[in-house]
Structures are given as C-alpha cells and as structure tokens.
Image: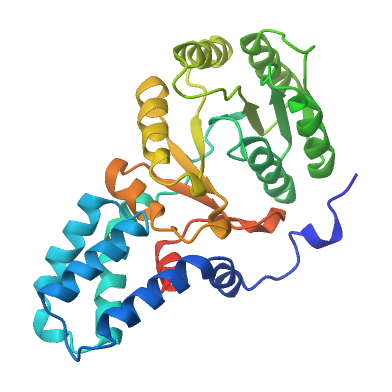
C-alpha cells in the first residue's frame, strides 16, 4: 500500500511555519511569561531576573541551564531595555547551547546501514520507525524493518502496518521469540536482499528494569555477529511530555548502549519544549529528529535556529 495522500513526502511543506504552529504551547508559555516580567518595568533588574529564571525552569529548560542563561544575560544588562532585546539575547544564547546537538546522522558508508531504535514503551518508538522507513523509501532506499519487540502485545502488527505504508520489508518471528534472534535474522536477510537500511525495533519496558538493558545489549551483540561495526546508529526515542524524566532515560540508555542520536517526540503536546535545551546542554548527544504531530512529515530533522525561532 502506498503512502496516504496527506503523507506524500514529495508535496512541498513550509516546515518553519508548521513547526511554529505545532510548538505554539511552548511559545505561548514563554511569551506570556516574558510579557508578565516586563509588564510593570521598563528595564530588567534582579527581581525580573529571578522571575525569568523561574520561567525557564518551569519550561523544563533545567536548573543548571537556566542559571547559565541568567549569568549570560547579566553580562548584557546594558543592552536590555525591553522584552524584544531580552528575547534576542535569549535566542542567541540558546542557539549556542543547541548547536552542539545539531550533528547529522552517521554517514551511510556501510550497506546495509543498521539503525537500532530504543526507548521505553509509550514514547512513540514504533511510529518513529515507521516514519523513518517512509522517509528512507521516499529517497529510493531499500528498507528492511526488524520486529524485535516480541514482548509487547500488538507491537509486530503495528509495525507491519507501518512497513506496508512505507513500502518497506519486515522480518518478524512469533510472539515471545528471542529478540536477538529476530535482529540477527533481519541483518542476515538485509545482506542477502541488498537492503540499504535496517531499522531494528526493540522492547521498551520500564527503563529501571535491569533485565531490559541486558536484553538490549544482547540484541546489540547479535547484530555485531553479522556485521562487526553494526549497529551503525543507536537512536533513543524520548517523549517530550515526560519532562525531566526524559533526562534519566537518556542517562540509563546511554550508559548501557552508547546512544548516538536522539529523537524527541510529542513536542506539539507540551508547553515545556525547553526539555530540548536541557537534554542537549546536559548530554551533548546529537538530536536528529523532533516529532510535532501524527503525519510522516511531522517527524522533522532538528534545526536549532528554526526551533528557537518557533518557541519565541
């Protein structure tokens, strides 16, 4: 089945306008807060800086990052006479923080290029894999999906629907099968079929479950048995609406697997889009994609300047 008409990747899209619309909750939260800070003042003083710090923290930018921003703003006291000047300085400082996270995905020097996708249940991992598959097939790449989440009820069926929509191949075993075996067979099939991309779905029970991490390491090792330098990317999918809890997920998955990139979903559903800044500032792991809606085109490559422009 071909992609639905409203998911046609060849159709022109004003991504900047779309991004601004979908991040309206975060933008309104910040704008209202900034306007309130300046409502009774012509300039900025210690009291307004304290209010600004509180606004940044409640936007999930993070305590340390908010403190760093305030310190940088203090150095520009003389240039701030109103809300517009403050916004301009904030935007420039936040962009400088985010630039460390704007690295592109690993260059595809191997064929197949194997991408292992991890994350806890409910973050949109399976949907993200489907959207990535559609983006790759739209680039005329041959994609194979590995249904290695064999424990969650309905996971394989959901992934099969996405594979059909994206016109990608899928390798799946029976429910409760060994996830590592599915991953191994998928890479083996990709080599035989001359696939360009392999997207490997994985289980996502609670990230506090030590057994899950060991299971993911086993999947990782099984992939390496077939292609020594694979997986070439390990993408961690996070739900932006979980706020600061996402930071603990990054730490755990990164320590266990060595995450190479992040996908942050559901940014359109939160007024706390500052979590993007907090994650980048804390871990400096490239943020490859952000999710701002249900359509395939709503999974967008992360651009620091466009993102900051959209939230201010």
Residue at 68% over, 49% down: 135
Residue 173: x %, y % from top left:
78, 13
The scheme the figure's colours follow is rainbow
Residue 308: x %, y % from top left:
40, 68
- The answer to whether residue 102 of the structure is visible from this angle is no
Residue at 35% over, 24% down: 255
Q: Residue furthest right?
A: 1
Image quadrant in which you'd find residue 19: bottom right
In the displayed structure, would residue 143 be above or below residue 173?
A: below
- The answer to whether residue 122 of the structure is visible from this angle is yes
Q: In the picture provided, is 98 more to the left or to the right than 216? A: left
Residue at 49% over, 30% down: 234
Image quadrant in which you'd find residue 88: bottom left
Q: Nearer the viewer, residue 254 or 198?
A: 254
Q: Nearer the viewer, residue 259 or 150?
A: 150
Residue at 75% over, 22% down: 153
Task: Point out the image quarter for the C terminus.
Answer: bottom left
Q: Nearer the viewer, residue 181 or 77?
A: 77
Task: Point out the image quarter for the N terminus.
Answer: top right
Residue 160: x %, y % from top left:
81, 31
In the displayed structure, would residue 26 be above or below residue 247?
A: below
Q: Nearer the viewer, residue 18 or 102?
A: 18
Residue 261: x %, y % from top left:
45, 39
Q: In the picture provided, is 38 more to the left or to the right than 154? A: left
Q: How many marks?
A: 0
In the displayed structure, would residue 294 be above or below residue 188?
A: below
């Amino acid at each position: 089945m071909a992609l639905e008409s409203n998911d046609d990747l060849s159709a022109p899209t004003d991504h900047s306008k779309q991004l601004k619309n979908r991040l309206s909750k975060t933008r309104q939260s910040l704008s209202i807060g900034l306007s309130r800070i300046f409502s009774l003042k012509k300039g900025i003083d210690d009291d307004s800086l304290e209010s600004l710090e509180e606004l940044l923290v409640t936007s999930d930018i993070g305590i340390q990052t908010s403190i760093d921003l305030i310190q940088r703003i203090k150095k520009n006291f003389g240039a701030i006479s109103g809300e517009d000047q403050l916004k301009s300085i904030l935007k420039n400082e936040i962009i400088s923080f985010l630039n460390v996270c704007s690295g592109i995905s690993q260059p595809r020097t191997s064929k197949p290029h194997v991408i292992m996708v991890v994350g806890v249940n409910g973050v949109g991992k399976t949907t993200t894999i489907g959207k990535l598959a559609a983006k790759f097939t739209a680039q005329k790449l041959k994609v194979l999906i590995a249904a290695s989440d064999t424990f969650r009820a309905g996971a394989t069926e959901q992934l099969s629907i996405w594979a059909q929509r994206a016109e990608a191949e899928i390798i799946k075993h029976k429910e409760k099968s060994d996830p590592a075996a599915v991953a191994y067979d998928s890479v083996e099939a990709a080599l035989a079929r001359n696939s360009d991309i392999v997207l490997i779905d994985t289980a996502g029970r609670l990230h506090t479950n030590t057994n899950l991490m060991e299971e993911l390491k086993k999947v990782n090792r099984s992939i390496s048995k077939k292609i020594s330098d694979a997986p070439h990317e390990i993408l961690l999918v996070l739900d932006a609406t979980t706020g600061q809890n996402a930071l603990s997920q990054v730490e755990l998955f990164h320590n266990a697997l060595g995450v190479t990139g992040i996908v942050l979903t559901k940014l359109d559903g939160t007024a706390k889009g500052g979590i993007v800044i907090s994650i980048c500032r804390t871990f400096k792991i490239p943020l490859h994609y952000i999710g701002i809606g249900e359509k395939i085109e709503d999974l967008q490559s992360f651009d620091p300047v466009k993102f900051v422009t959209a939230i201010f």
